[in-house]
Image (tube, grey):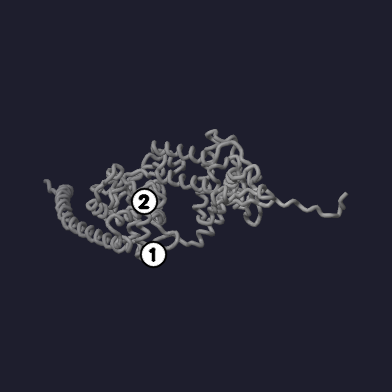
Amino acid sequence: MANSNTRRSARKPTSDDKPNWRIAWGLSLGFPLFPHQNGRWAKKVRGKLSYFGKIADDPKGAKALDLWNEQKDDLLAGRTPRTKTVGVTVGELCDHFMQAKDDLLATGEITKQTRIDYFRTTTRIVDKFRKTRTVADLTPDDFQALRSSLAKTLGHVALGNEIQRVRVVFKHGYDSGMIDQPMRYGPLFKRPSKKALRIDRAEKGERMIEAADIVRLIEAADVQMRAMIYLAVNCGFGNSDCGTLPLASLDLAGGWLDYHRPKTGIDRRCPLWPETVAALKAALEKRPAPKSDDAKPLAFVTKYGAPWAKDTFDNPVTKEFRKLLEDMELHRAGLGFYTLRRVFRTIADGSRDQPAINSIMGHADASMAAAYRERIDDSRLRVVADHVREWLFPDLVSKEKADAEVAAQTKAVGEAERKPRRVNEKSARKARASGEVAGQAFQLRIVG
């Protein structure tokens, strides 16, 4: 009997035991796994060995490679690989969701920009979770990891909007019956707190462009961008508003614009300044020939004959306005074409007519008064627009007011010079009539 204390030497593997994996894969150096001495396919990830089946059962490593591709995202992220289950995948859910949004876009129930935002969100979801992963396999840790990755590139407001869109995607899966129960996102997958938003806003400062700088931008802009800037400051227009503005909505002879807001569908009516009318006329005179059916009814057409509103993540109006800001050395974080809409609202509040301001901007009004209000008088809309114009062009408006006063005084003097003659003649007639009556009343007669 052999001594129990004697170490039994392991049998050295022969050439038959070791599969020649380099030959089997045609010297494919791109094969990610290696044959471990324990007889299994292996891969070292984040300093730890992971195994993918016995070499004897899979000499060419085909099954091992499939298993590696299935688990590599979890391993590279430091997560424990989850068992593959049967169910709706992330890719299937996102495809179904986008198809539903395409149907709404076709019927005009959502805008192109909304569809673009949702497509970007679903792309991020697929990139983070993988399209082959089942929705039922997602855990709160996965959503927290998604939030952390989004927070690296998005500001607080954009982060909150993106989180809400992610929730909309998975709620669609539950509402449509694709998944059996609502998702559990965990306690941290939510919008930034109001305190965080306030601090972030305080750190960034006001997102305003002052009147003198807006005038500089107007003077430096080309003919189309100048008209867009006027619409933004005059009517509170945003990027999509300018890009989708139909020619039929403009009444340049009367100085009015009637165009519902694409985002909300709320009707808007805005009085146009003389400067805005002149800028629009100049832009229409040099309007490029449309080269697509989508561009034909629009007021603004690019030099390529296409609409300014496009199905892209980067809005053409935003890009052109940023170039203008940089040329004028006015660009800073948080400023863009949409800032001009903020400028309009900020200054218009000084008119103290919130319903009229909301009507011009196309903001929804959920108050009880709005439920009973059928329309807003044009004179109130003019007061709001004139208030913003006076802020932008104070010297011009002051001169106009002074000239108007002089004209009014001149007119009053002319009327006064004519009015006394008529009054004196009338007074004389009254005086004569009164004298006659008075003479008759006090006439002394001697009788006898």
Q: Secondary structure at mark 1?
A: loop
**Front-lying residue, 269 or 400:** 269
Q: Residue furthest bottom?
A: 329
Identity of the residue drawn at 32% across and 46% down: 245
Q: Which quadrant holds residue 90?
A: top right
Disc 2 and disc 1 in contact, CB within 8 angstroms: no
Q: Is residue 214 left or right of residue 172?
A: left
Q: Is residue 336 left or right of residue 57?
A: left
Residue 4 seen: yes
x, y percent for residue 66: 58, 44
Q: Is residue 68 left or right of residue 284?
A: right
Residue 443 seen: no
Identity of the residue drawn at 72% across and 52% down: 12
* Residue marked by disc 2: 237
x, y percent for residue 92: 51, 38
For the residue marked with disc 2, what is the amino acid? Phe
Q: Which quadrant holds residue 340?
A: bottom left
Are there few (<14), some (14-19), or many (20+) residues within 10 Å of tag 2? many
Identity of the residue drawn at 70% across and 50% down: 13
Q: Residue furthest left?
A: 448
Identity of the residue drawn at 49% across and 45% down: 122
Q: CA distance from mark 2 to mark 1?
A: 20 Å
**Front-lying residue, 161 or 368:** 161
Q: Residue 204 has which mark? A: none
Q: Secondary structure at mark 2?
A: loop
x, y percent for residue 18: 65, 49
Foreground disc of the pair 2, 1: 1
* Residue marked by disc 1: 330
Q: Residue furthest top?
A: 177
Q: Which quadrant holds residue 86?
A: top right
